[in-house]
Image: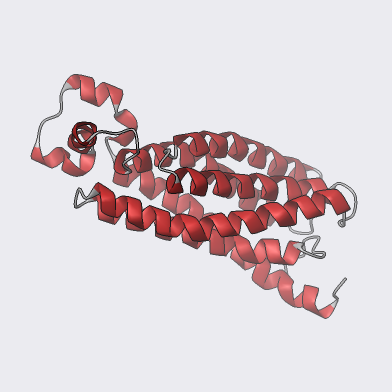
């Protein structure tokens, strides 16, 4: 059985991670499918609907992580190992949700996720090297997958921005973005300039597919960790 340091709100944190992973894939997947029709307004509706739930989840992440950071409930440096990445994830979800709801674009939250992903991998590597759990490979795998998913968030959010209309976009600009998206590439031959300027959104299904695989893999592993640790936590509550 996997045994991680599992005290107080850490149980809820591990349970919420696979839920968040499934929600992210569901929201972006629905947005992509809506974008295949070229209906930007429908994409916006779908993304905003999901952003509300993701924002609430991000708020819970942030509150729990801040509570853990301030009360220091875990033994020693375990507070840093578990609460720091969790807080970063909460902030990312909040930033993404607010950006989508306000029609401000998601690329900036993607950059935040990319930087946070690098730090998450570093936390996982240090936890592995220091042997901070009885199953260091599970810890390393979970942190590495979430970190890689964070890195992949930037190009994925560029794809989302190509599908989302913003308050600054005129109908002509939306039409131009639509014509440059690979969803419609089979209907026309893009210019070399368009290819050069929009390489991140030329293959949205490939980019989103890599993102989805990483997010789902991280969610599955965190779910496996939670399933194996929750019984022990319930049996010996703090």
- Tell whether 79 sits left or right of 40: right
Q: Nearer the viewer, residue 116 or 231?
A: 116
For this orientation, the residue located farthest to the right is 76
Viewport quadrant of the N terminus: bottom right
- Visible in this render: residue 216? no
Residue 9: image quadrant is bottom right
- Between 123 and 37, the one lying in front of the other is 37
The number of discs equals 0
Residue 121, percent across and down?
Answer: 64, 41
Q: Position of residue 123 (x, y in %)?
A: 71, 41
Outermost residue on the bottom side: it is 235
Q: How is the image coloured?
A: secondary structure
Asked whether residue 88 is in view, the answer is yes
Which quarter shows the C terminus?
bottom right
Name the spot of residue 35 as percent of width and height, x first. 26, 50
Q: Left of 134 or right of it: where is 187?
A: left
- Determine the residue positioned at 74% across, 77% down: 231
**Which quadrant of the structure image shows residue 61?**
bottom right
Vertical arrangement, residue 33 with respect to residue 206, above or below:
below
Q: Is 67 situated above or below 88? A: below
Residue 195 falls left or right of residue 121: left
Residue drawn at x 62%, y 51% is: 141
Question: Does residue 27 sit above or below 151 in this rendering?
Answer: below
The residue under the point 63% across, 55% down is 59
Q: Which residue: 31% across, 35% down? A: 201
């Amino acid at each position: 059985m996997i045994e991680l340091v599992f005290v107080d709100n850490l149980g809820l944190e591990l349970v919420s991670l696979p839920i968040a992973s499934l929600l992210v894939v569901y929201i972006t997947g629905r947005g992509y499918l809506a974008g295949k029709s070229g209906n930007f307004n429908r994409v916006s509706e779908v993304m905003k609907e999901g952003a509300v739930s993701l924002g609430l989840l991000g708020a819970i992440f942030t509150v729990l992580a801040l509570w853990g950071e301030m009360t220091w409930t875990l033994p020693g440096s375990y507070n840093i190992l578990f609460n720091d990445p969790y807080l970063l994830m909460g902030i990312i979800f909040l930033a993404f949700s607010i950006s989508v709801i306000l029609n401000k674009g998601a690329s900036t939250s993607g950059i935040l996720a990319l930087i946070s992903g690098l730090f998450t991998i570093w936390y996982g590597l240090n936890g592995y090297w220091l042997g901070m759990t009885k199953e260091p490979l599970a810890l390393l795998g979970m942190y590495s997958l979430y970190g890689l998913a964070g890195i992949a968030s930037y190009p994925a959010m560029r794809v989302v921005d190509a599908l989302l209309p913003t308050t600054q976009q005129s109908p002509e600009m939306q039409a131009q973005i639509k014509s440059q998206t690979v969803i419609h590439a089979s209907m026309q031959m893009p210019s070399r300039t368009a290819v050069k300027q929009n390489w991140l959104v030329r293959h949205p299904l490939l980019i989103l597919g890599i993102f989805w695989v990483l997010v789902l893999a991280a969610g599955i592993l965190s779910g496996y960790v939670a399933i194996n640790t929750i019984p022990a936590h319930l049996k010996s509550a703090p």
